[in-house]
Image (tube, rainbow, N blue to C red):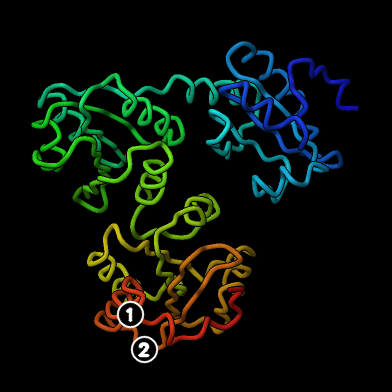
C-alpha cells in the first residue's frame, strides 16, 4: 500500500542494512512509521516528495515499526518519529508539527548549510554580544580556523540549530567573551542570557564533537526551566544534576526561593519547575512517576531523568537556607547513602 504513493526516492532500512547504509551517507533522515498509524499515512506522500527534492544532497529513509531493535536504539515511543542522522552517529530530532514536503526539505537544507562564522576583530565580537540577547552563542578559541578542531566545532553546530556558533584565533576577542587570555588553546565559551544579564560558561575539556555536544546540550537551556511538552526532551537528555520543584501556580514564595537558590549553582545544577495546578494529563502522569501525589510543594533531587532515575525527596523546611543546603549536599553527593529513593521511584 505504501508503494502506491510513489516512494522511489525513499530508502527502506532494516536491522540488517542500517549500519552499512548510514555509513555510506553523510545525511540520512529516518522516518519511523507504523502501518496502522493515520498520521504516518498523512506524512508518507509529503515525506516522499521531500526525498525527491533533496535527492543528491541527503537521503530520506523509512523504518517499519517491526524493526524493534532500531526503534529501541532511537528510543522511539510513538509514530511517526523523524530524525536526521549526521555522519552515521549524531542525530537531530525533527519536532516541528509542520510536516509538509517544503518544511521537511527546508529544515534539512538549513542544517546542511549551517556554518561556524569566523570572528577576527573586537568590533565584530562586540556586535555579536550586543545581538546575543534571548539567544545562545558559542565561541571557540582555536589555534587555526581550518584544522581538525574547527571541523569538530562545525559538526556540533549542525546538531544545535538553535545555537549560533563562532570561532576565533584572536585572544582579545576571546577575552571579550570571558575566556582568559592565558587559557590553553583550544577552549570555548557558551553565552546565554538569563534575566537581565548574560552567563558565560567556559569549556576546557576534550575538543571532540561528542564532548562539545554534551557540553552544549547540558548548558544551553535556561538554568531554571518550566517543564512543558515542548522542552521535555531537552530536560530528559540533559546530563546535569537536576533539582525539581513540584508546586501549584500560586506558590509564589517557594517558587521565588527556588529561583534564588539557583543563582548559587548556575551551570552546575539544572532547576526544573513543574506547575502541578496544570490539568494536562502529562503533568498528572509526571507527578505520579515522581511520587508527588498530595499537591503540596515538593523538592526532589534527580540524578537521571528517565525510568531509571534516582530521585530523592527533600523533607526539610522550604526555606532559602534549607533548599540551598540540600542542593549543596546533592552536588557533593553527601547524602547518597543516607536517603531512600522517593516514593514511587523507579530507580
Image vertical order of residue 272 relative to residue 4, above or below: below
Q: Position of residue 160 (x, y in %)?
A: 43, 36
Q: Splitting the image into 4 quarters, where does residue 121 fall?
A: top left
Extreme top residue here?
56
Residue at mark 2: 316
Q: Residue at x 11, y 37 (%)?
A: 176
Q: Position of residue 72 (x, y in %)?
A: 70, 49
**Residue occupied by mark 1:** 326
Label 2 element class = loop
Q: Is residue 173 above or below residue 67?
A: above
How far apart marks 1 and 2 lie (CA) works out to 9 Å
Residue 38 in the image: above or below residue 54: below
Whether residue 80 sits left or right of residue 89 in the image: it is right
For residue 200, above or below residue 256: above
Q: Could you tell me which residue is drawn at 27 percent across and 52 percent down?
A: 194
Crowd around label 2: few <14 · some 14–19 · many ≥20 (10 Å): few
Q: Residue at x 67, y 40 (%)?
A: 81
Most foreground residue, 267 or 294? 267
Dot 1 or dot 2: first in sequence order is 2
Does the CB distance between marks 1 and 2 fall below 8 Å? Answer: yes
Q: Does residue 178 appear to the left or right of 50 in the view shown?
A: left
In the image, which is nearer the foreground, mark 1 or mark 2?
1
For label 1, the SS is helix
Left or right placement of residue 251 versus residue 259 in this view: right
Residue 61 in the image: x percent, y percent? Answer: 71, 27
Which part of the image, by quadrant, shows the N terminus? Answer: top right
Residue at the extreme right: 1
Quarter residue 141 falls in: top left
Residue 233: x %, y % from top left: 53, 51
Amino acid at each position: 500500500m505504501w508503494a502506491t504513493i510513489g516512494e522511489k526516492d525513499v530508502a527502506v532500512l532494516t536491522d540488517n542494512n542500517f549500519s552499512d547504509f548510514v555509513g555510506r551517507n553523510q545525511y540520512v533522515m529516518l522516518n519511523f512509521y507504523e502501518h496502522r498509524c493515520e498520521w504516518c499515512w498523512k506524512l508518507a506522500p509529503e515525506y516522499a516528495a521531500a526525498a525527491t527534492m533533496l535527492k543528491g544532497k541527503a537521503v530520506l529513509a523509512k523504518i517499519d515499526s517491526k524493526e524493534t531493535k532500531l526503534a529501541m536504539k532511537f528510543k522511539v515511543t510513538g509514530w511517526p518519529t523523524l530524525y536526521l542522522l549526521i555522519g552515521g552517529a549524531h542525530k537531530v530530532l525533527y519536532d516541528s508539527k509542520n510536516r509538509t514536503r517544503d518544511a521537511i526539505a527546508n529544515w534539512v537544507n538549513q542544517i546542511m548549510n549551517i556554518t561556524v562564522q569566523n570572528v577576527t576583530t573586537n568590533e565584530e565580537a562586540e556586535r555579536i554580544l550586543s545581538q546575543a540577547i534571548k539567544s545562545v552563542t558559542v565561541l571557540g578559541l582555536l589555534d587555526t580556523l581550518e584544522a581538525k578542531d574547527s571541523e569538530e566545532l562545525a559538526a556540533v553546530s549542525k546538531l544545535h540549530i538553535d545555537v549560533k556558533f563562532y570561532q576565533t584565533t584572536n585572544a582579545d576577542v576571546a577575552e571579550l567573551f570571558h575566556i582568559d587570555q592565558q587559557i590553553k588553546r583550544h577552549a570555548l565559551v557558551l553565552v546565554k542570557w538569563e534575566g537581565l544579564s548574560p552567563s558565560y560558561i567556559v569549556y576546557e575539556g576534550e575538543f571532540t564533537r561528542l564532548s562539545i555536544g554534551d557540553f552544549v546540550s547540558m548548558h544551553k537551556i535556561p538554568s531554571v526551566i518550566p517543564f512543558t511538552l515542548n522542552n521535555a526532551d531537552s530536560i530528559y537528555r540533559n546530563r546535569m544534576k537536576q533539582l525539581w520543584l513540584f508546586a501549584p501556580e500560586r506558590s509564589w514564595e517557594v517558587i521565588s526561593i527556588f529561583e534564588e537558590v539557583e543563582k548559587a549553582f548556575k551551570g552546575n545544577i539544572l532547576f526544573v519547575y513543574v506547575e502541578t495546578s496544570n490539568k494536562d494529563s502529562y503533568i498528572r502522569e509526571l507527578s505520579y512517576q515522581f511520587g508527588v501525589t498530595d499537591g503540596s510543594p515538593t523538592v526532589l533531587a534527580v540524578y537521571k531523568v528517565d525510568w531509571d532515575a534516582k530521585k530523592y525527596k527533600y523533607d526539610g523546611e522550604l526555606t532559602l537556607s534549607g533548599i540551598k543546603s540540600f542542593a549543596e549536599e546533592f552536588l557533593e553527593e553527601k547524602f547518597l547513602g543516607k536517603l531512600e529513593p522517593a516514593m514511587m521511584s523507579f530507580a
